[in-house]
Image (cartoon, rainbow, N blue to C red):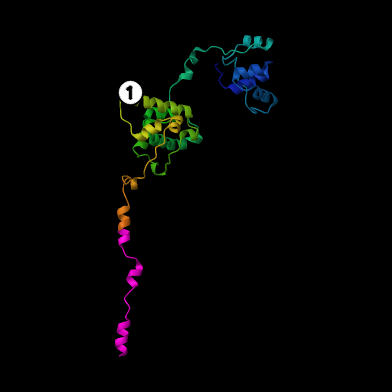
Amino acid sequence: MAKPIMAKATAVWLVDNTTLSFKQIAAFCGLHELEVQGIADGDVAAGVRGFDPVANNQLTADEIKKAEANPAQPLSLKFNAAAVGEEKRRGPRYTPLSKRQDRPNSILWLVKFHPELADAQIAKLVGTTKPTIQSIRERTHWNIANMQPIDPVALGLCKQSELDAAVQKASAKRAAEGSAMSDDERRKLLSTEQSLGADSESKIPTAIAGLEGFSFAREEEEDRSVPDADTFFNLPDNDDDDEDEDK
């Protein structure tokens, strides 16, 4: 259902100037019923000036009168031909000012861990421009030395479902084009269930790979052939030499 512009200010006006129920106002303005009750009590939207929906071509006076007479009748937004397709406006995602400084870090994360994503997909996910993405890819960004890759989902710049959908779309396009992917890239495209369900293979460390059938018997034989330390110090007795000296 379409919502009026300046919904909270419209709710303030309806509370002050009509006898509509809180439920009717909440349904029309897209608010919670308790929030509308808070507006009536003065706890919510304090200092907000009411926005007249009749004067601004969002409601008709007859529509309000009918809803006041029947509390079960919902309000319907007046049709505005100029607003058709307004919700489908294309363009970069809006990013709050408090999170814009984290955008380069999220772009670096996407470029590093999801290289299959196109620049247009990254721009749509985090609300940035292609020149910025290109500068980070080429490491020519002015602040590249101080940037750290951070997951855009953790930063609140996009949803996990949106990121998964973009990755799956990019992988499907790459598979259709027949481009080869490395093992690391294939592993990144696996879902969590697939990764956990994969058979674990016991791998031999690289340092001892190829020595599975090597026998250490020869080394043991060589160790036995080496005399022990006592052999070097057990010298023959010199009793005969001592007797000759006494004579």
Residue 131 in view (yes/no): no
Total numbered badges shown on the rendered structure: 1
For the residue pair 67 and 119, the one nearer the viewer reads as 119
- Helix, strand, or loop for circle 1? helix
Which secondary structure type mostly characterizes the magenta part of the structure?
helix
Say which quarter of the image contains residue 54.
top right
Q: Position of residue 37 (x, y in %)?
A: 68, 23
> Few, some or many C-alpha atoms within 10 Å of disc 1 (few <14, some 14-19, many ≥20)?
few
For the residue pair 204 and 233, the one nearer the viewer reads as 233
Say which quarter of the image contains residue 39.
top right
Q: Which residues are magenta?
A: 222-247
Please check the rendered image and state whether residue 243 is part of the magenta-colored stretch, yes or no.
yes
Q: Looking at the picture, does residue 84 appear above or below residue 119?
A: above
Is residue 52 found left or right of 154 in the rendered image?
Answer: right
Please check the rendered image and state whether residue 189 is part of the magenta-colored stretch, yes or no.
no
Is residue 130 found left or right of 193 in the rendered image?
Answer: left
Q: Position of residue 170 (x, y in %)?
A: 38, 27
